[in-house]
């Protein structure tokens, strides 16, 4: 059994004993091996004792030479171990010259310097720089970098690094070099280098203050012609940040490179963003509407990091959400500004509930700012990113856009060029607005999803509504004690005509205008009195999802149907429909499927027939809650019963409303040139949803319609909608369509990923067999993270019914893959492992199988820190609330 990984604690943070002011790096790139010469200008930090040794991080490196102030150091002047190098005696200031040798072609972890396709590239966040050279690889050591890259000129005509090109030259052996200088001091995790034979899409942006910036997106040549949308998105993001926050790009060169092998989505390296091709490349015939939307969001995200992350960076990795939560929130604001804000909000909350709520209720639960970790790569989580963004959104809700902007401005005024903490951010927000946010700070420290329960009483004689709000957070495995949080509850009161009423709180003399008001819940329980009402209102609670909580309020089904039809808050209109559908399906899970209640059917029909409504919102309203959301409401997750309940609902609605669904399908055909604009996206979405319902009927006519939809599609959105449905079908003609697709797109990796994914997500009972077969397909390469996620990841994390087969076959399949993948790419292997971590939530038989699979992984010799941490947490940590005490 592998040793328990060593844990790092927030409480143990100490400032760096030595600081690095300048770094000069020289890379000699070669297919056989790459040599790196690093010259560091080092200074002892004030307060460090003179006899303090110098410690540098380093992993998987071959040290070629080491010199201090130009004197080569011999073996007894320093010590080497698996994690770095220690020089026992150093003067107060000095230069250190280090030569290391790497083998990028063998770097399958995709951290540090590695090869992807025909190019060299880097990924240094969080701790990849130590796989390039010995260095104090921590974000609070910030240095100025000069980088010289040398390589074969024919194979690597493009040589890139951070900042500006300052010199270049040719060598007589067919090699050439380029020198880059980054004027901004930065932490090592923002270092980047790229070398390859790349196509460049160039453009320019002039900032509001008149600075001219060169923009460039680099791709492999075969992807030229697929970067227009990314470029438009980049310019839109630059414009938006200037408009909204007065933040301009501080660089002369803003470069983006797309690489095919990448562990995550994209990386905000200073002036040289590196992207997963998935979030750059688009063309109507190869990318879906969702791809277009995601590209815009991720381009925005990495660009916004230039201020929130790069100009002001992190003191330590526990503060990760300081940059990620804030940048996700800025990305969300940008996406909403670009179009369809309510749709965007609905989708954000859907993913939060599907990914973050379960995490917060399982053995990996951790606060937005974790207090301990073994492997930081395991903490790039839904909690840090999405719940972190919800925390930022709550500041915004409490302070308003103006107050929030003031707070952000103060944050930059105080901390530009520094490495700081979440407290620094909170203090800037509080000070700029003269607001007490002390209790609000608990959102960073407390894990678990709070439940807010609401009781109301209406006194008709005085026209007074009394609302009692209570909050409660269950203990989580990482944290037993929970305390009250500061929670903004956006409230609307809806009259019987569907209009918002004015909300006058007890101590106010005049009634404000009708509309939403934010109640601030700070205590465990609090009562709010609202007066001046002329009828009993219907409560519209937590409008826009104003806090990442679960709401507990006794709505009747009639009230939910009323809000579904009438709420003035678009998000809550959707929410009412989800609640209603969830309630019915939960009943069916208990008692077996029954009839669809007339109230629900009528509401559904009405929405479908409403030709005035925004098709995008109609589509959201008519999309049934995912199985994972229903599961969250159950003490023991019953996978089959949930699936059956949802499928019954889907078919029942289709059968009852087939004519209306066919009419919607006809009405929303989008003619003309493909454009990824919100209006068209909404109509395609509704049309494809109608097709999905109709397909559930499963008759000959449904199959014909899917095949016709597939054949007629002139864009990838429609093609994939049809293909996903065909992948559910046992008909030979459906299989033929899948084959034709594979044949047509055999040379297009991103499209082939889609082909693997739809099959991994198939509802067919023999899906696992098919997935196994696909792992032997010549195009399946587990070393490519996109491909692995498209097949193995999608099946294990996105196909509940397929993965959770009662005999445990899905779990064994996963365990086999984790074991095979761990030595190749531990970061991706660990992520896959989390599909097993919530084993305690399933019935006894499944729980036992999942646990066995975890134990089999645990028993592997030399397990990575990444996988080992996930397995250990999953097996050891019991729910406090499951204890019988
Ligand atoms: N900072 C990146 C972001 O924008 C996240 C990221 C990209 C990352 N690549 C990574 C994190 C590799 C860890 C390892 O969100
Ligand atoms: Zn980020």
Image: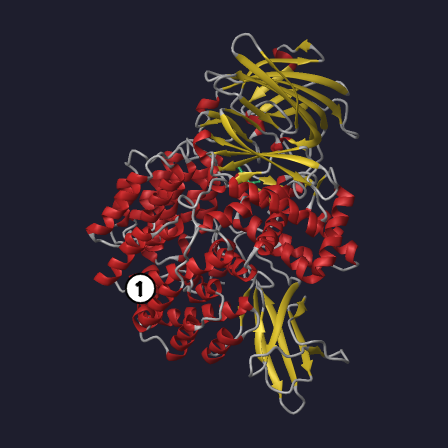
Residue 610 point in image, percent of width and height: 45, 72
Given residues 483 and 664, the one toward you in this image is 664
Given residues 224 and 317, the one toward you in this image is 224
On screen, residue 221 above or below 502: above
Q: Quadrant of the N terminus?
A: top left
Instruction: Name the residue beneath numbered marker 1.
Output: 694
Given residues 47 and 113, the one toward you in this image is 113
Name the outermost residue toward the bottom: 461
Q: Residue at x 55, y 30 (%)?
A: 128
On screen, residue 66 above or below 836: above
Residue 707 point in image, percent of width and height: 27, 54
In the visual, does 852 lie left or right of 39?
Answer: left
**Disc 1: CA contacts within 10 A as few (<14), some (14-19) or many (>=20):** many
Name the outermost residue toward the front: 672
On screen, residue 2 above or below 487: above
In the visual, does 317 lie left or right of 713?
Answer: right
The reply to whether residue 858 is visible in this rendering is no
Residue 250 point in image, percent of width and height: 70, 37
Quarter of image, res 416: top right
């Amino acid at each position: 059994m592998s040793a328990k990984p060593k844990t790092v604690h927030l409480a143990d943070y100490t400032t760096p004993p030595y600081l690095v002011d300048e770094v000069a790096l020289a890379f000699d790139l070669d297919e056989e091996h790459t040599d790196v010469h690093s010259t560091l200008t080092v200074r002892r930090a004030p307060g460090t004792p003179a006899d303090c040794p110098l410690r540098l991080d380093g992993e998987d490196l071959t040290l070629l030479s080491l010199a201090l102030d130009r004197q080569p150091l011999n073996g007894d002047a320093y010590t080497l171990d698996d994690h770095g190098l220690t020089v026992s005696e150093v003067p107060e200031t000095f230069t250190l010259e280090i030569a290391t040798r790497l083998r990028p072609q063998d770097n399958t972890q995709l951290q540090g310097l590695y090869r992807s396709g025909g190019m060299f590239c880097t990924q240094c966040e969080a701790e990849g720089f130590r796989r390039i050279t010995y260095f104090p690889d921590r974000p609070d050591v910030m240095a100025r970098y000069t980088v010289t890259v040398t390589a074969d000129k024919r194979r690597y005509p493009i040589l890139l690094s951070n900042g500006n090109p300052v010199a270049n030259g040719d060598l007589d052996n067919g090699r050439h070099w380029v020198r880059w200088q980054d004027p901004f001091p930065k932490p090592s995790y923002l270092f980047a280098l790229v070398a390859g034979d790349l196509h460049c899409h160039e453009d320019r942006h002039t900032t509001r203050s008149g600075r001219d910036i060169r923009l460039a997106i680099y791709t492999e040549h075969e992807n030229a012609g697929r970067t227009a949308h990314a470029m438009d998105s980049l310019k839109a993001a630059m414009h938006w940040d200037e408009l909204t926050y007065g933040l301009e790009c501080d660089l002369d060169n803003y470069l983006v490179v797309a690489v095919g092998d990448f562990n995550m989505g994209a990386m905000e390296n200073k002036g040289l963003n590196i992207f997963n091709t998935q979030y750059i490349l688009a063309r109507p015939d190869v990318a879906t509407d969702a791809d277009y939307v995601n590209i815009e969001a991720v381009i925005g995200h990495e660009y916004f990091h230039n201020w929130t992350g790069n100009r002001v960076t992190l003191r330590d990795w526990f503060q990760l959400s300081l940059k990620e939560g804030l940048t996700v929130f800025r990305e969300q604001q940008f996406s909403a500004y670009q179009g369809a804000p309510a749709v965007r909000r609905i989708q954000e909350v859907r993913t939060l509930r599907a990914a973050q709520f379960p995490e917060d209720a399982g053995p990996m639960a951790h606060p937005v700012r974790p207090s301990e970790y073994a492997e930081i790569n395991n903490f790039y989580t839904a909690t840090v990113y999405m719940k972190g963004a919800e925390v930022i959104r709550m500041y915004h809700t409490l302070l308003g856009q103006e107050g929030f902007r003031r707070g952000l401005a103060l944050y930059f005024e105080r901390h530009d060029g520094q490495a700081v903490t979440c407290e620094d951010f909170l203090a800037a927000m509080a000070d700029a607005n003269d607001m007490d946010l002390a209790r609000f700070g608990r959102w960073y420290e407390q894990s678990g999803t709070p439940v807010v329960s609401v009781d109301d009483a209406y006194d008709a004689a005085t026209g007074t509504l009394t609302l009692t709000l209570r909050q409660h957070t269950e203990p989580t495995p990482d944290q037993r004690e929970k305390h009250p949080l500061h929670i903004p509850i956006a409230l609307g009161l809806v009259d019987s005509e569907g209009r918002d009423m004015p909300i006058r709180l007890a101590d106010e003399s005049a009634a404000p205008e009708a509309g939403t008001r934010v109640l601030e819940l700070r205590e465990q329980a609090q009562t709010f009195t609202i007066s001046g009402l002329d009828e009993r209102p219907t409560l519209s609670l937590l409008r826009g999802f104003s806090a990442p909580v679960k709401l507990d309020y006794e709505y009747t089904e009639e009230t939910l149907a009323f809000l579904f039809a009438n709420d003035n808050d678009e998000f809550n209109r959707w929410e009412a429909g989800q609640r209603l559908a969830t309630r019915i399906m939960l009943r069916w899970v208990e008692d077996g499927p029954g009839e669809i209640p007339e109230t629900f059917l009528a509401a559904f029909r009405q929405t479908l027939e409403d030709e005035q409504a925004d098709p995008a919102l109609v589509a959201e309203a008519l999309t049934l809650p995912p199985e994972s959301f229903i599961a969250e409401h159950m003490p023991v997750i019953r996978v089959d019963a949930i699936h059956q309940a949802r499928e019954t609902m889907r078919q029942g609605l289709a059968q009852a409303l087939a004519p209306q669904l066919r009419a919607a399908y006809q009405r929303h055909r989008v003619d003309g040139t493909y454009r990824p604009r919100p209006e068209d996206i909404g109509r395609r979405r509704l049309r494809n949803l109608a097709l999905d319902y109709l397909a559930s009927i499963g008759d000959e006519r449904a199959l014909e319609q899917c095949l016709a939809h597939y054949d007629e599609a002139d864009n990838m959105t429609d093609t994939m909608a049809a293909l996903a449905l065909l992948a559910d079908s046992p008909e030979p003609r459906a299989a033929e369509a899948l084959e034709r697709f594979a044949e047509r797109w055999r040379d297009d990796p991103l499209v082939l990923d889609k082909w693997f994914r739809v099959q991994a997500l198939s509802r067919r009972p023999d899906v696992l067999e098919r997935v196994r077969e696909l792992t032997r397909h010549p195009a399946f390469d587990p070393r490519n993270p996109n491909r692995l996620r498209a097949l193995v990841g999608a099946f294990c994390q996105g196909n509940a019914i397929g993965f959770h087969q009662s005999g445990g076959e899905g779990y064994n399949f996963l365990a086999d893959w984790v074991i095979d993948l761990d030595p190749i790419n531990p970061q991706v292997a660990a992520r896959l492992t989390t599909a097993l971590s919530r084993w305690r939530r399933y019935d006894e038989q499944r729980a036992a199988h999942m646990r066995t699979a975890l134990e089999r992984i645990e028993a592997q010799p030399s397990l990575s820190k990444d996988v080992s941490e996930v397995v250990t947490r999953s097996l050891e940590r019991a729910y406090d609330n499951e204890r019988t005490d």
